[in-house]
Image (cartoon, helix red, strand yellow):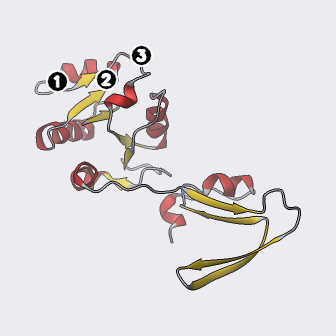
């Protein structure tokens, strides 16, 4: 199993050391970051990849640990030409729409990622009227309990992250995920 980290800092050194020494994982970083890690005593275990060939990077990385803000997550996703592996994002103090984990809990959170059960989730589900020109009448249930009745073009059931594009397309604002869950 391999994790990808971005730039070295005290927090990233802690995560790299934890993943390698405690969880027995290989740690992979970007080439320019690897040069810095290589000069730090005790971090010779950190590996890298060739930046010009990232076509198979998704086959080497089981998950990405991002420490920082949303920009770090976007940067990490751009490293992969194939499928992007799961991303675990840790907030380092600034506002982040996608950084849902507190850094103080990184050990427990990463142990859950490494040793926990894997399950699939959906970001959103859209039920719409399709090419039908008439208004739709929908009833939304959770098990046998009626949640709401809707008349319109359709209904969207989404996570706070999944609903952002729909909200902004309709003229709404962007909320951080914790605000949207309340």
Q: CA distance from mark 3 to mark 1?
A: 26 Å
- State the mark number for residue 33: 2
* Mark 3 vs 1, N-terminal side: 1
Q: CA distance from mark 2 to mark 3?
A: 16 Å
Residue in the picture at 60% in, 60% down: 125
Mark 1 residue element: loop
Instruction: Say if mark 1 contacts mark 2, CB within 8 Å.
Output: no
Q: Position of residue 9 (x, y in %)?
A: 27, 34
Residue in the picture at 19% in, 37% down: 25
| Label 3 environment density (alpha carbons within 10 Å; few <14, some 14–19, many ≥20) | few
Residue in the picture at 28% in, 51% down: 113
Q: Which residue is mark 3?
A: 53
Q: Is residue 24 above or below residue 122?
A: above
Q: CA distance from mark 1 to mark 2?
A: 11 Å
Mark 2 residue element: helix
Compared across the picture, whether 122 is left or right of 7 comes to right
Work out which quarter of the rendered image holds the N terminus and state it.
Answer: top left
* Mark 1 vs 2, N-terminal side: 2
Q: Position of residue 110 (x, y in %)?
A: 26, 49
Q: Which residue is mark 1?
A: 40
């Amino acid at each position: 199993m391999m994790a990808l980290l971005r730039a070295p800092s005290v927090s990233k050194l802690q995560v790299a050391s934890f993943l390698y020494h405690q969880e027995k994982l290989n740690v992979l970083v970007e080439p320019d970051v690897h040069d810095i890690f290589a000069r730090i005593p005790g971090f010779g275990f950190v590996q890298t990849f060739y930046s010009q060939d990232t076509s198979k990077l998704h086959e080497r990385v089981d998950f990405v640990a991002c420490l920082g803000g949303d920009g770090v997550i976007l940067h990490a996703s751009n490293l992969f030409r194939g499928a992007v592996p799961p991303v675990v994002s840790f907030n380092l103090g600034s506002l982040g729409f996608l950084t849902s984990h507190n850094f103080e809990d990184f050990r427990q959170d990463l142990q859950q990622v490494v040793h926990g059960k894997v399950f699939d989730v959906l970001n959103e589900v859209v039920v719409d009227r399709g090419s039908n020109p008439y208004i739709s009448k929908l009833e939304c249930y959770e098990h046998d309990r009626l949640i709401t009745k809707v008349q319109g073009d359709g209904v969207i059931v989404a996570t706070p992250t999944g609903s952002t594009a729909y909200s902004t397309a309709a003229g709404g604002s962007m909320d951080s995920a914790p605000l949207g869950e309340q």
